Amino acid sequence: MPETFIWLPDWPATAGFGFSGVSAIALRHLATRAYYYTSVRGDNPKIADVKENLWSLGFTPSVFSRPSGDRKAKGVDIALTKDMLSHAFLANYDAAVLIAGDGDYVPLLEEVKRLGKLVYVIFFTHPAAGLNDDLRLAADYFLDLTGIFFERWNRHASEARKMAEPS
């Protein structure tokens, strides 16, 4: 959904991503829960529609109203930070996976790591994506999402073209 959310086709929200060089760390293949934080321009029915779409992908959605003209709502960052930090403090996870590139999350990662949790950051390394290098360096492990993302979307588009071709 443009300017609201994006996800990989046919990829469950709780499915893992591969991390090279992480074989010594016993991570579960599937996460127990996956959260998606976003904002949308629109009324309550629009927010409900976005929540429904994210839920159908397997996420626990946290959707905020975004004033028109703004790129994002502040509530997104605050809610994500509150949840990631409180779940770390309550020992609800051993490893967190953050799919983001915003350098504002560096203090969050440092605090979660101080609580003894592993932190994985997944994001695009292309300069236009806006990955903050301090965020990448604050993570225990970083995975470039670019290859996985384009491989999945290209395969999805190719399959859709084949299905649309006349027999």
Image (tube, grey):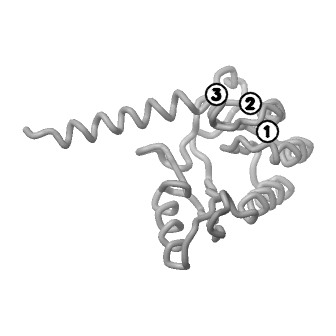
Where in the figure is residue 18, as x and y percent of width and height? Answer: 59, 30
Q: In the rendered structure, find residue 19 and report the number of the disc placed on it.
A: 3
Left or right, 59 with respect to 134, comes to left
Q: In the rendered structure, find residue 42 and report the number of the disc placed on it.
A: none
Residue 13 in the image: above or below residue 151: below
Mark with earlier residue (1, 3): 3
Task: Measure how far apart labels 1 and 3 are at the Cα level.
Answer: 13 Å
Answer whether labels 1 and 2 touch (C-beta < 8 Å).
Answer: yes
Residue at 51% of width from left, 66% of height from top?
50
Task: Measure how far apart labels 1 and 2 are at the Cα level.
Answer: 8 Å
Name the amino acid, label 3.
Phe
Left or right, 52 with respect to 75, comes to left
The quadrant the C terminus occupies is: top left
Quarter of the figure with residue 164: top left
Where in the figure is residue 117, as x and y percent of width and height? Answer: 82, 42
Q: Residue furthest left?
A: 167
Q: Secondary structure at mark 2?
A: strand
What residue is shown with label 1? 118
Residue at 55% of width from left, 79% of height from top?
44
Answer whether labels 2 and 3 touch (C-beta < 8 Å).
Answer: yes
Residue 59 in the image: above or below residue 16: below
Q: Residue furthest front?
A: 69
Residue at 73% of width from left, 45% of height from top?
96
Task: Measure how far apart labels 2 and 3 are at the Cα level.
Answer: 8 Å
What residue is shown with label 2? 141
Residue 149 in the image: above or below residue 100: above
Mark with earlier residue (2, 3): 3
Name the amino acid, label 1.
Leu
